[in-house]
Image (cartoon, grey):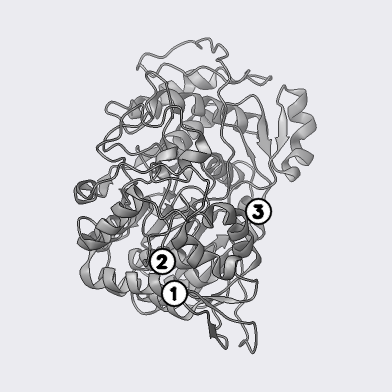
């Protein structure tokens, strides 16, 4: 979504509604969102102006990058509620400047203990999304608490204050918020709690009105006072479980809404987990990412290794490296024991895969390689049976933060589909996630991403931090389902192989090759590379918009350039603490 101002206008409360709609009237002048900023003392980029300002305010008051990232993510749960929220999950990649180390925190949702590999078999995808069955055990709050406890300086209650303020005073409804509400209206109206919040008077909030969410503000207040145990085994958790097991379906609705499997014990058992980051070295720079349960770090890292083994890198090589890395992702990566991560990211395996890339495109879907530790001559890559890739939307969101001490955060947060599972927890002001639809539905014997009790569905989120000579250089990430991986990879290739600046690298037209017969691409990419790539055996098909990235780069002397999208998803908001030292 696009960022939006937060003017408090003259208000008129709708009777019986938790939402305050306001006619656009005497608004004070608004700070405009800007996609690029440079300066000192700290920096932040998100898709939303309110969230960026919330995070920046924390930095200005002496908070560090983790404090600001949590504040920004919580605010996105207010202003970007169809992409983020306290009932979602995500991944944090964090550079600790004091110790010169990169850490990661896995806050991915988990499946209930009652879920089995066959639990989603035969369920139509759309029916699975809009149901209690798709709701995973939320990870965000546990992740926030762990991050603040380990690396922050604020309490959870302090970090939630900016989000409480925005939820209380409201934010201005933009075209994107209106359109995303309208596109979800058919399912939103089928749940009493969701219709009451997001369809006041039976329609999406008007562009230019002010949207308030006092129920979410109060939920955040209680969460700040009571702590995460209120959710993980307490009353809020019980309300989530009740909503999952007995969705508040609107009387007369004809929608088939399946109940979920979550129990309060599943919430009590949830833990956010610190994991060792993935790491590859590309052109002398150390690229750190998120290990499984995410496939982001392994797939971006493998593709970079493949590219490094080639004599030159162009659009053709970028697509082919991505194709091969995705073949290996599908075969080997999931939330399972024994993922051959070391071999997937090894130089020997990358060289064996790279030697398959020639002048012509490898037929897709290509077969996976064999990361067995014994590498030599190229191994044949037979063409596999075609596997459909679901349509990828703009859901999920990403933010970057750097503080005055040189700490850096790259953070992906999500509730999965735009609007999650469509069900608002009654009286609490937030949507539930549909993360369990990220599992393979099956039957698919041997698939590493089949559902299972307590398992985390495989993710493509790829928050990435790059160091050079042990110092932070760059951080980047994006939303977009499995296109996240290719978006991050392409930005890095644009920056280092194609000689673009970071703003140019983010703005450049994108293409995504995920081991499919056709490569999806934005029109600008087709215009620029289409004839050349078609002649080399690629088939390009239009995808109007891929990803909505944020990133930052250290320019030297303490100066930071922070970047958001100029156009995609309506453009983002990049801010710095000070333009001068």
Image position of 429 with respect to 466: above or below:
below
Q: Please name whichever residue, 68 or 372, is drawn nearer the observer in this view of the structure.
A: 68
Say which residue appears at 44% left-offset and 49% top-offset.
463
- How far is disc 1 from disc 3 in space, using C-alphas? 31 Å
Image position of 350 with respect to 217: above or below:
above
Q: Please name whichever residue, 551 or 212, is drawn nearer the observer in this view of the structure.
A: 212
Say which residue appears at 55% left-offset and 19% top-offset.
366
Q: Position of residue 208 (x, y in %)?
A: 64, 75
Identify the residue under disc 2. Answer: 429
Front tag of 2 and 3: 2
| Image quadrant where residue 75 sits | bottom left
Which quarter of the rendered picture does the N terminus lie within? bottom right
Q: Please name whichever residue, 241 or 28, is drawn nearer the observer in this view of the structure.
A: 241
Q: Is residue 35 left or right of residue 127?
A: right
Q: Position of residue 151 (x, y in %)?
A: 26, 61
Identify the residue under disc 1. Answer: 167
Front tag of 1 and 2: 2
Q: Is residue 288 left or right of residue 274?
A: right
Residue density around tag 1, few if under 14, some if 14–19, many if 20 or more, within 10 Å:
many
| Secondary element at tag 1 | helix
Identify the residue under disc 3. Answer: 507
- How far is disc 2 from disc 3 in space, using C-alphas? 34 Å
N-terminal-most mark, 2 or 3: 2
N-terminal-most mark, 1 or 3: 1
N-terminal-most mark, 1 or 2: 1
| Secondary element at tag 3 | helix
């Amino acid at each position: 979504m696009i960022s939006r101002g937060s003017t408090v206008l003259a208000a008129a409360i709708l009777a019986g509604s938790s939402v305050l709609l306001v006619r656009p009237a005497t608004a004070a002048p608004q700070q405009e969102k800007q996609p690029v900023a440079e300066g000192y003392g700290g920096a932040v980029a998100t898709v939303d102006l309110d969230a960026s300002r919330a995070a920046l305010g924390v930095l200005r008051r002496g908070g560090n990058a983790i404090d600001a990232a949590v504040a920004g993510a919580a605010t996105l749960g207010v202003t970007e509620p169809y992409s983020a929220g306290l009932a979602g999950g995500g991944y944090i990649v964090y550079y600790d400047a004091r110790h010169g180390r990169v850490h990661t925190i896995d806050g991915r949702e988990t499946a209930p203990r009652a879920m089995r590999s066959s639990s989603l078999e035969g369920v139509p995808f759309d029916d699975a999304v809009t149901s209690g069955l798709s709701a995973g055990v939320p990870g965000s709050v546990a992740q926030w608490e762990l991050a603040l406890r380990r690396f922050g300086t604020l309490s959870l209650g302090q970090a939630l204050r900016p989000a409480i303020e925005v939820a209380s005073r409201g934010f201005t409804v933009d075209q994107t918020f209106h359109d995303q509400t309208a596109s979800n209206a058919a399912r939103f109206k089928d749940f009493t709690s969701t219709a009451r919040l997001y369809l006041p008077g039976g329609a999406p909030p008007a562009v230019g009105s002010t949207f308030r969410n006092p129920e979410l503000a109060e939920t955040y207040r209680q969460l700040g006072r009571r702590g995460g145990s209120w959710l993980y085994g307490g009353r809020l958790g019980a309300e989530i479980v009740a909503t999952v097991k007995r969705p508040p379906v609107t009387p007369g609705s004809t929608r088939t809404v399946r109940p979920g499997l979550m129990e309060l014990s599943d919430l009590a058992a949830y833990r956010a987990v610190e994991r060792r980051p993935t790491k590859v070295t590309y052109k002398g720079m150390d690229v750190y990412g998120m290990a499984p349960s995410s496939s982001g770090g392994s797939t971006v890292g493998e593709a970079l290794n493949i590219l490094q083994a080639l004599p030159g890198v162009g659009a053709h090589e970028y697509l082919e490296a991505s194709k091969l890395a995705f073949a290996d992702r599908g075969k080997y990566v999931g939330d399972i024991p024994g993922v051959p991560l070391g071999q997937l990211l090894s130089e020997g395996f990358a060289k064996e895969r790279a030697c398959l890339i020639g002048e012509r495109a490898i037929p897709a879907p290509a077969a996976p390689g064999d990361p067995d530790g014994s590498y030599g001559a190229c191994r044949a890559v037979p063409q596999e049976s075609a596997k459909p890739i679901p349509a990828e939307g703009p859901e999920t969101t990403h933010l970057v933060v750097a503080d005055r001490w040189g700490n850096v955060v790259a953070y992906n947060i999500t509730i999965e589909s735009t609007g999650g599972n469509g069900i608002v927890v009654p009286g609490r002001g937030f949507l539930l996630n549909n993360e369990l639809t990220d599992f393979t539905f099956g039957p698919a014997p041997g698939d590493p991403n089949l559902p299972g009790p307590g398992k985390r569905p495989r993710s493509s989120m790829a928050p990435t931090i790059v160091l050079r000579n042990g110092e932070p250089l760059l951080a980047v990430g994006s939303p977009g389902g499995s296109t996240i991986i290719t978006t991050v990879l392409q930005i890095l290739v644009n920056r280092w192989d194609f000689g673009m600046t970071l703003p140019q690298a983010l703005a450049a037209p994108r293409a995504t090759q995920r081991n499919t017969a056709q490569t999806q691409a934005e029109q600008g990419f087709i215009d620029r590379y289409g004839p050349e790539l078609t002649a080399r055996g690629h088939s390009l098909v239009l995808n109007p918009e891929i990803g909505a990235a944020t990133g930052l780069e250290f320019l030297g002397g303490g100066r930071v350039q922070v970047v958001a999208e100029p156009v995609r998803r309506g453009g983002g908001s990049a801010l710095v603490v000070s333009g001068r030292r």
